[in-house]
């Protein structure tokens, strides 16, 4: 008896579901474009999801006098995954015109639009791994990058970015600052004045932060 009741209930529920589905299909057939509208809601297609940007900026790596950030130039490829979230990959070179000071870097971030307007203006936050390659002082160092940036996307396809962030070292550099050249003790009774500014570079340890400034312009497609 229980089995018969279960089968009967299943048949009733199946009939109701089939009737409902048939009714919805009939309604969709009567209203042109309904099925296409429903499909678009479930699988939206982002307009112009790809972006290529040319970047310029300044990156501090404690490899210059007084810790002054050095200029950097790069190219970014980005892809929108949702209207507010995108992923980006940037390859860049620092000190492009100097054979002795040149280094390379790779940056991968996820970018989230915290505030976004219909006219294309957005305040974004971004974060991800940053890898400094072949730095003349510190070698290859992994870092973590965080950033706050203003982004504007023009209706005709252009995109602009201005941002400031911090790179935090995830490992220590093998570079060790050499000892001071000034004598630690006085020579006899004579007063010796010595001012040693030290080398232009400074040690870089895990957890040390440095500034990262970015300006970019690109095209969406």
Image (cartoon, helix red, strand yellow):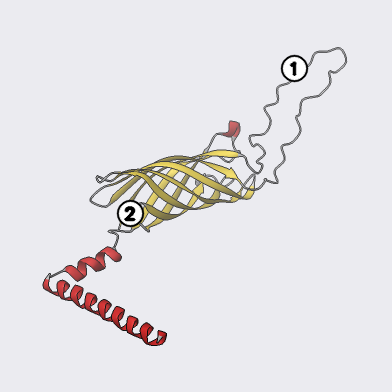
The crowd level at tag 2 (other Cα within 10 Å; few <14, some 14-19, many 20+) is: few
Which tag is nearer the camera, tag 1 or tag 2?
2
State left or right for residue 15 relative to residue 51: left
At numbered mark 1, what does the secondary structure look like: helix, strand or loop? Answer: loop
Rounded to the nearest whole Å, what is the CA distance between mark 1 and mark 2? 63 Å
Q: Which residue is mark 2?
A: 83
**Residue most toward the front?**
1
**Toward the viewer: 220 or 35?**
35
Residue 76 coordinates in the image, percent (x, y): 42, 53
Residue sitting at 63 percent across and 34 percent down?
200
Quadrant of residue 89 within the rendered picture: bottom left
Quadrant of residue 37 within the rendered picture: bottom left
State left or right for residue 163 relative to residue 209: left
User: Relative to 30, does residue 73 appear above or below in the rendering?
Assistant: above
Looking at the image, do the residues carrying marks 1 and 2 touch, with CB atoms under 8 Å apart? no
**Toward the viewer: 11 or 27?**
11
Residue 101 coordinates in the image, percent (x, y): 58, 44
Residue sitting at 18 percent across and 75 percent down?
23
Residue sitting at 30 percent across and 78 percent down?
13
At numbered mark 2, what does the secondary structure look like: helix, strand or loop? Answer: loop
Residue sitting at 65 percent across and 41 percent down?
204
Q: Which residue is mark 1?
A: 193
Residue 11 coordinates in the image, percent (x, y): 31, 83
């Amino acid at each position: 008896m229980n089995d018969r009741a279960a089968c009967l209930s299943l048949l009733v529920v199946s009939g109701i579901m089939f009737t409902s589905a048939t009714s919805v299909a009939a309604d969709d057939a009567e209203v042109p474009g309904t099925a296409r509208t429903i499909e678009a809601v479930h699988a939206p297609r982002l307009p112009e999801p790809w972006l290529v940007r040319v970047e310029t900026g300044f990156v501090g790596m404690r490899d210059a006098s007084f810790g002054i950030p050095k200029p950097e130039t790069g190219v970014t490829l980005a892809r929108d995954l949702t209207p507010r979230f995108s992923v980006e990959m940037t390859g860049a070179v620092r000190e492009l015109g100097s054979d002795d000071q040149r280094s390379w870097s790779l940056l991968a971030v996820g970018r989230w639009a915290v505030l976004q307007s219909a006219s294309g203006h957005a305040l974004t936050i971004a974060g991800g791994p940053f890898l400094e390659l072949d730095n003349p002082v510190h070698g290859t160092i992994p870092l973590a990058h965080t950033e706050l940036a203003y982004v504007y996307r023009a209706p005709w396809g252009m995109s602009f970015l201005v941002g400031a962030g911090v790179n935090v070292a995830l490992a220590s550099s093998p570079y060790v600052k050499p000892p001071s050249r000034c004598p630690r003790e006085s020579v006899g009774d004579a007063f010796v004045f010595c001012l040693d500014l030290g080398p232009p570079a400074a040690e870089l340890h895990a957890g040390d932060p440095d500034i990262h400034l970015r300006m970019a312009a690109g095209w969406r497609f």
